Image (cartoon, rainbow, N blue to C red):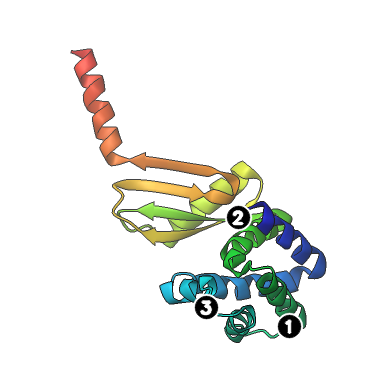
């Protein structure tokens, strides 16, 4: 991860705020390619030369910014194209720090209204003094769990845990 941080530091110094957001989108697209085993096989294959790997990754880019192409070339020459996913994650984290804006996820086994999400966002934003954006993720979780990885926050309320605690309390009272 330290290597990814060094590359991100160079990116932060080379791009302005708007360009960083565009770069993050490009790296997000490349990161999604890592979900394909074929993509990983191509990048890690000793039978494919560096130039072909670099050209392959560049062919996936929508934005043909010369600095981004040079960056991909640098990663390829140093046999570090496999770090693209980590670089994207670290870049997003640094952009979040810079903008004081963080993204989190809500896991719930029931429907949550838009107003409830906005209320949760407002509460978390006030508590942490930052802009917090929350997205719903489908889950079978019997309760609600909110996770904001960038600031290390996870809070949950489980119906099963509540039932167990109530039963334990009742048994202690008897």
Residue at the image position 69 percent from the left and 60 percent from the top: 95
In the image, taking residue 158 as reference, residue 26 lies left or right, namely right
Q: Position of residue 23 (x, y in %)?
A: 68, 73
Residue extending furthest front?
47
> Which callout, 1 or 3, points at the residue further toward the start of the chain?
3
Q: Position of residue 80 (x, y in %)?
A: 63, 66
Residue named by callout 3: 47
**Closer to the camera in the image, 122 or 29:** 29
> Which callout, 2 or 3, points at the residue further toward the start of the chain?
3
Whether label 1 touches label 2, CB < 8 Å: no
In this rendering, the label closer to the viewer, 1 or 3: 3
Numbered circle sitting on residue 65: 1
- Label 2 crowd bin: few (<14), some (14–19), many (20+), radius 10 Å: many
In the image, taking residue 39 as reference, residue 61 lies left or right, namely right
Gap in angstroms between the C-alphas marked 1 and 3: 29 Å
- Label 3 crowd bin: few (<14), some (14–19), many (20+), radius 10 Å: few
Instruction: For residue 122, say whether it is visible.
Output: no
Q: Quadrant of residue 158?
A: top left
In the image, taking residue 120 as reference, residue 150 lies left or right, namely right
Gap in angstroms between the C-alphas marked 2 and 3: 41 Å
User: SS for tag 2?
Assistant: strand
Whether label 1 touches label 3, CB < 8 Å: no
> Which callout, 1 or 2, points at the residue further toward the start of the chain?
1
Q: Position of residue 150 (x, y in %)?
A: 59, 50
Residue at the image position 60 percent from the left and 55 percent from the top: 102
Gap in angstroms between the C-alphas marked 1 and 2: 27 Å
**Closer to the camera in the image, 94 or 115:** 94
Q: Quadrant of residue 60?
A: bottom right
Position of residue 127 relative to residue 89, above or below, is above
Q: Position of residue 88 (x, y in %)?
A: 61, 64
In this rendering, the label closer to the viewer, 1 or 2: 1
Residue named by callout 2: 102
């Amino acid at each position: 991860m330290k290597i990814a941080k060094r590359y991100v530091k160079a990116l932060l110094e080379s791009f302005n705020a708007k360009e960083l957001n565009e770069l993050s989108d490009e790296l997000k697209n490349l990161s999604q390619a890592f979900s394909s085993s074929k993509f990983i096989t191509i990048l890690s294959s000793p039978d494919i030369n560096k130039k072909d790997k670099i050209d392959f990754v560049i062919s996936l880019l929508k934005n043909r910014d010369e600095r981004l192409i040079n960056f991909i070339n640098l990663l390829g020459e140093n046999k570090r194209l496999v770090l693209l996913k980590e670089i994207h994650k670290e870049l997003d984290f640094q952009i979040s720090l810079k903008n004081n804006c963080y993204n989190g996820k809500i896991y719930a086994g029931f429907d949550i209204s838009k107003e409830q999400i906005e209320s949760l966002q407002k509460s978390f934003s006030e508590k942490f003094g930052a802009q917090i954006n929350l997205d719903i993720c489908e889950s079978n979780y019997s309760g609600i769990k909110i996770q904001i990885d960038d600031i290390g926050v996870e809070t949950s309320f489980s119906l099963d845990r509540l039932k167990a605690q109530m039963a334990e309390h009742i048994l202690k009272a008897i």
